[in-house]
């Protein structure tokens, strides 16, 4: 059975705000930093959430893509501490930026945590064009054609890349495929649908219309066909 780590998308205030997010109405808009490109899972989830926010001011989504979420994390972290900037991010990525040495700043420790928004699960996915219907189909093909299959991952030196490696090792095909890091889930899905890669490890929120090979929760591990 093949397990993947879940992602928890959380909301953070910038460093030093002391929780001053619910402000009285003023001219300022409340900017919500989304550290990925428009159209991806994080973007869709945050924009869907925004319609239910009542912060006493207009909320504006600001997409800051680059380095698999790291550029947006830095912009949120370095924003003015006036209570008018909120950042959404995967908390495990914030931790991994520091643990991997990508960031000298302990981003996760210094940001003001507000709440979790959603728990999302990573999937191993393929396009229907491959004809693979089970994880075993993938394993059999890769073993028969080592070096021909590419696997998309959201970023490198982060949790997503690490869980991608662990999954491929558990499947026994890690040394027979090539992992291709992408800047975000939307870019990886676009590459998959365009036939540039044959597999991807991506969040449930980012995948649409794709045949998924395996996904897990604490109680379920199975092959699923979406």
Image (tube, rainbow, N blue to C red):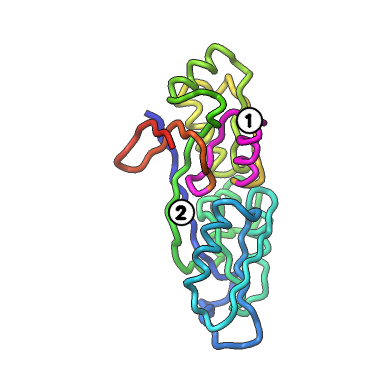
Mark sitting on residue 64 = none
Point out the image quarter for the N terminus: top left
Q: Residue placed at 60% from the left, 45% from the top? A: 100
Magenta-span inclusion, residue 207: no
Labels 2 and 1: the sequence-earlier one: 2
* Of labels 2 and 1, the one closer to you: 1
Residue farthest toward the top in the current orientation of the protein: 144
Taking the image as shown, residue 168 lies to the left or right of residue 224, namely right
Q: Residue placed at 63% from the left, 19% from the top? A: 148
Q: Is residue 77 above or below residue 189?
A: below
Residue 58, image quadrant: bottom right
Point out the image quarter for the C terminus: top left
Residue 106, image quadrant: bottom right
Taking the image as shown, residue 139 lies to the left or right of residue 14, namely left
Query: Where residue 117 sits in the image (x, y, percent)?
Result: 45, 61
Q: Can you identify the residue that label 2 sits on? A: 8
Q: Residue placed at 62% from the left, 64% from the top? A: 33
Q: Can you identify the residue that label 1 sits on? A: 197
Residue 222, image quadrant: top left
Q: Residue placed at 65% from the left, 37% from the top? A: 191
In front of the other: 83 or 37: 37
Query: Where residue 89 sits in the image (x, y, percent)?
Result: 55, 58
Query: Where residue 98 sits in the image (x, y, percent)?
Result: 59, 51
Q: Residues within 10 Å of mark 2 (few under 14, many from 20)?
A: some
Q: Where are the magenta residues, as a range?
A: 186-205
Label 1: which secondary element: loop
Magenta-span inclusion, residue 189: yes
**Mark pair 2, 1: CA separation:** 26 Å
Query: Where residue 78 sits in the image (x, y, percent)?
Result: 67, 67
């Amino acid at each position: 059975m093949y397990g993947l780590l879940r992602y928890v998308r959380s909301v953070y205030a910038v460093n030093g705000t002391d929780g001053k997010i619910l402000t009285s109405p003023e001219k300022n808009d409340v900017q919500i930093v989304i550290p990925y490109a428009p159209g991806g899972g994080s973007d869709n989830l945050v924009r869907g959430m925004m319609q239910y926010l009542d912060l006493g001011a207009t909320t504006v989504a600001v997409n800051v893509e680059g380095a698999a979420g790291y550029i947006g994390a830095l912009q949120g972290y370095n924003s003015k501490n006036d209570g008018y900037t909120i950042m959404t991010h995967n908390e495990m990525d914030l931790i991994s930026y520091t643990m991997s040495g990508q960031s000298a700043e302990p981003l996760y420790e210094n940001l003001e945590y507000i709440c979790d928004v959603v728990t999302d699960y990573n999937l191993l996915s393929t396009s229907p064009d491959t004809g693979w219907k089970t994880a075993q189909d993938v394993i059999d093909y890769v073993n028969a054609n080592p070096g021909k299959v590419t696997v998309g991952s959201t970023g490198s030196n982060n949790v997503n890349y690490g869980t991608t490696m662990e999954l491929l090792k558990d499947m026994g095909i890690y040394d027979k495929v090539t992992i291709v890091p992408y800047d975000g889930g939307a870019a990886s899905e676009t590459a998959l649908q365009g036939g540039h890669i044959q597999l991807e490890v991506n969040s449930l929120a980012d995948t649409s219309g794709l045949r998924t090979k395996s996904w897990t929760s604490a109680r379920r591990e199975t092959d699923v066909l979406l």
